[in-house]
Amino acid sequence: MKVSVVAHPQFVVADIDPRLYGSFIEHLGRAVYTGIHEPGHATADANGMRRDVIDLVKELDVPIVRYPGGNFVSAYNWEDGVGPKEERPVRLDLAWHTSESNEVGLHEFADWCVSANTEMMLAVNLGSRGLDEARNLLEYANHPGGSEWSDKRIANGRKEPFDVKLWCLGNEMDGPWQIGHKTADEYGRLAHETAKAMRAFDDKLELIVCGSSHSEMPTYPEWEATVLDHTYNEVDYISLHMYFDNQANNTPNYLAMNRKLDDYIMSVAGVIDYIKAKKRSSKQVYISFDEWNVWYHSKEQDKKILEGADGWPFAPPLLEDIYNFEDVLQVGLILNTFIRRSHVVRIACLAQLVNVIAPIMTAPNGPAWRQTIYYPFLFASRFGRGKALDLKVAGPTYRSDVAGDVSCLDVSAVHDKEGGAVSFFIVNRSDRVIEAEFDLAAFGRNLSIADHQVMMHADLKAVNSEANMMNVAPKKADTAVLADGRLSATFAPYSYQMVRIKV
């Protein structure tokens, strides 16, 4: 099979917001405890945070991390996580039927973010609480001093404000599973009034309102229209969530699911445009896709853990998907979709970062390692910053049950003008070899291949583990040929590749 790709520096989708490569830490399972935080671990710092995990997070170059939830936030009292640790209460987490020690809270997480070279994206509880909790947390986090809540922060050991700019107004409030679930009108009114109060404190905050939990929700997309009708002029983003699975063990269908993601994004973009026109507004609201990942491997195990639990367990191993090579292809496809839609998707958060449906796994008192999906996220995060290019791709397709016809070769590209490179992220989701030619003549003739990384494996179900951490990993390739402004390369069946061209 043959594919042709044309790339031109003037054919641009958008300047990519680096926060497209954000992530997420929730008080769920072992994400926090024995994930990022394990006092007594051989690598633990003075705050009990695992340095081996910090090093892996820094390697990913994650610009933001959403915290503390997720479903957890909808019954969370943020005050429980500040002040002397010995005085913090143990709470029952209704979202995940576990116990929360509150040993890690706002201060500890903020210090971890500094160590991991990232910034906080905080969520407020609009489930069991509301406007008052949000404004008090904002004052505690961001006011310099001289008020009740900012002085409490100072008394708790932090003189300078945390200066958090990005705030989520609740989490998945459309979901009946959510503590404090609301109708679109109820939530829209509350989110509007909360946003007004937060902007009265600081009109430069970036605020994210809840959209649909997934595209199969019965209230989608009416939920978005109603909520934005209430909040459009007070918020900057609407959040979307989507998870992917291969429960049916049908690889062609599984690898076509990013078409559903694309439809989801563009449908909500249409709702945004509709409400913008209805409001006669000059303001542009964007999408924050602040939960996405593959999630299905651990679901049966989680049922057994919770059904067999004695009471309310502390940090049980929940949602610990062990990712295979097939999931590498899926994550690569999702990231390609975000890059191609970066004109409307400005923020995205891989859910989650450590242990819980995560690219990084840890063993208590043991090592940390990279899961298979770590690598496509690493390549996109490190080399997918700059201008997303509007590629012209022509080639064969295959028919899927879930999304109709999809291209056999899925490609995105980012032009980093300052760095002098164009990076192509390529997934062959077919079972056949593809020969592709890339027309790069518009970038000049003085081109060279800066890097070419390939991920492929004879077993689509191959995984990485503590015993075999590098079973699925990228390898440097030298098979691509560049001459006269044209790149020629062969893409093996079911493979992920990154090619960087120095321009």
Image: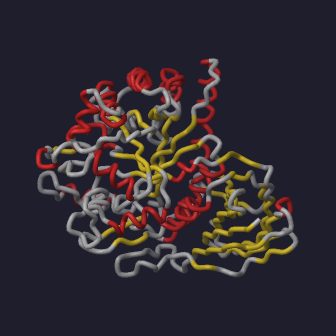
* Closer to us: 169 or 221: 169
Q: Position of residue 129 (x, y in %)?
A: 27, 29
Q: Position of residue 486 (x, y in %)?
A: 83, 69
Q: Position of residue 125 (x, y in %)?
A: 32, 34
Which of the 4 image quarters holds residue 83? top left
* Closer to us: 138 or 151: 151
Q: Is residue 171 left or right of residue 60?
A: left
Judging from the image, the colouring scheme is: secondary structure
What residue lies at 69% left-to-right and 51% top-to-bottom? 387
Which quarter of the rendered picture does the N terminus lie within? bottom right
What residue lies at 64% left-to-right and 72% top-to-bottom? 431
Considering only vertical position in the picture, is 411 above or below 196?
below
Q: Is residue 73 left or right of residue 103?
A: right
Considering only vertical position in the picture, is 497 above or below 119?
below
Q: Is residue 315 visible?
A: yes
Q: Is residue 78 visible?
A: no
Q: Position of residue 264 (x, y in %)?
A: 57, 42
What residue lies at 61% left-to-right and 30% top-to-bottom? 284
What residue lies at 46% left-to-right and 54% top-to-bottom? 350
* Closer to us: 418 or 134: 418
Q: Is residue 396 left or right of residue 486?
A: left
How many numbered markers are drawn?
0
Which of the 4 image quarters holds residue 71? top left
Which of the 4 image quarters holds residue 152? top left
Which quarter of the rendered picture does the C terminus lie within? bottom right
